[in-house]
């Protein structure tokens, strides 16, 4: 176990650091931060412009979940057919409209910026890691690399789950729901893209639960014993969260609740390992 330095040793280290010519002043740190943000913005804009230029392919991918023969429905049907069921989804068609003169162009721009941010996110994480690395010890650098990679992978899994499961099922239910045959559903493109981006970001951040548990465990604010003790209540809270971010559909609720609860169990395992390492 690493011995904690005495106050005298900390003071001597600070005095030595202040005379180190390689140490940066506050103004120099701000300059490094400014250059880092400038590089991040440039990379994001390059990706956004490239995505903007490939308009047809971009919106083909974005609008695919709105189709009745989306790949998710096909795999669900194949899965059920494997067990002898003849279940098949009903065909549907929902009109996407633009009600404002500039709405399609502005949606194209905002969507390109959003996707540019997603595509550039690995580079953004690398830049942020390079910025904080000088302030870390060697063992902290190794841990921070693992945490950073895990955060990104969990975010990607959340985004993919939203794209392939949550959003298409939500769109199908809400888009085809009708209070009367006299009412026709025409969804605006702005509403479609807004719902799509909101759900993907929400799921990306919700999947950070094990990372949040890790940091809370490091601060000794939670423990694996505490999470095990409140398993039942956590399951109810997870179901409530899933009900809020999903349409009032039992199938979607189950598809979202299960992975979220699995993340809760993963958080318990993360805290167990952290506690063993402390001992």
Image (cartoon, rainbow, N blue to C red):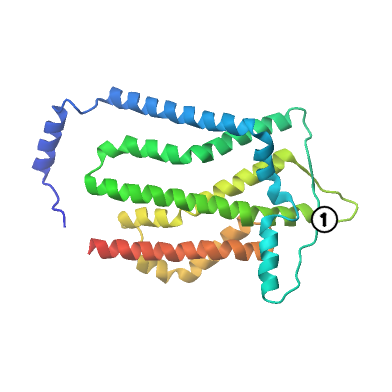
Q: Quadrant of residue 59?
A: top right
Q: How many marks?
A: 1
Is residue 101 visible in the rendered image? The answer is yes
Question: Which residue appears farthest toward the right when viewing the image?
Answer: 182
Q: Secondary structure at mark 1?
A: loop
Query: Residue 81 versus residue 90: which sits nearer the camera?
Result: 81
User: Residue drawn 19% across and 27% down?
Assistant: 22
Which residue is rendered at x = 15% and y = 32% of the image? 17
186 w.r.t. 233: above or below: above
**Residue 221 shown left or right of residue 76 in the figure:** left
Residue occupying image coordinates x 73% and y 57%? 173
Please give the residue where the numbered disc 1 appears in the rendered image.
178
Q: Report x, y in % for residue 160.
A: 56, 52
Q: Residue furthest bottom?
A: 84
**Quarter holding the N terminus?**
bottom left
Residue at figure coordinates x 65%, y 62% from the top left: 252
The answer to whether any part of residue 239 appears in the image is: no
Taking the image as shown, residue 208 lies to the left or right of residue 252, namely left
Residue 66, how many percent across, how many down? 72, 50
Query: Residue 180 or 260: which is nearer the viewer?
Result: 260
Q: Position of residue 10 (x, y in %)?
A: 13, 40
Residue 124 in the image, given as x and y percentages of width and height = 43, 37
In the picture, measured across the screen, residue 27 lies left or right of residue 42, that is left
Mark 1 Cα shell of 10 Å, populated few (<14), some (14-19), many (≥20): few
Q: Is residue 220 above or below residue 228?
A: above
Quarter of the rendering containing residue 279: bottom left
């Amino acid at each position: 176990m690493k011995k904690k330095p005495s106050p005298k040793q900390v003071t001597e280290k600070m005095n030595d650091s202040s005379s180190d010519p390689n140490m940066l002043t506050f103004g120099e740190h701000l300059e490094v931060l400014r250059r880092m943000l400038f590089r991040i913005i440039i990379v994001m804009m390059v990706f956004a412009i490239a995505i903007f230029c490939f308009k047809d392919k971009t919106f083909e991918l974005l609008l695919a979940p709105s189709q009745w023969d989306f790949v998710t429905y096909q795999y669900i049907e194949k899965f059920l057919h494997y067990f002898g069921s003849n279940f098949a989804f009903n065909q549907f068609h929902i009109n996407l409209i633009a009600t404002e003169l500039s709405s399609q162009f502005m949606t194209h721009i905002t969507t390109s910026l959003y996707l540019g941010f997603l595509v550039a996110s690995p580079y953004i994480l690398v830049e942020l890691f390079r910025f904080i690395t000088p302030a870390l010890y060697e063992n902290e650098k190794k841990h921070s690399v693992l945490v950073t990679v895990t955060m990104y992978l969990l975010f990607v899994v959340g985004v993919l789950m939203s794209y392939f499961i949550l959003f298409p099922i939500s769109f199908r239910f809400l888009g085809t729901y009708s209070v009367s045959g006299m009412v026709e559903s025409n969804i605006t493109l702005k509403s479609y893209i807004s719902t799509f981006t909101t759900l993907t970001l929400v799921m990306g951040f919700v999947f950070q639960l094990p990372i949040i548990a890790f940091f809370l465990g490091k601060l000794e604010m939670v423990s694996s014993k505490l999470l095990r003790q409140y398993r039942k209540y956590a399951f109810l809270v997870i179901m409530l969260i899933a009900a809020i971010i999903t349409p009032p559909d039992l199938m979607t609720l189950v598809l979202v609740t299960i992975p979220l609860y699995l993340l809760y169990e993963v958080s318990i395992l993360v805290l167990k390992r952290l506690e063993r390492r402390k001992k």
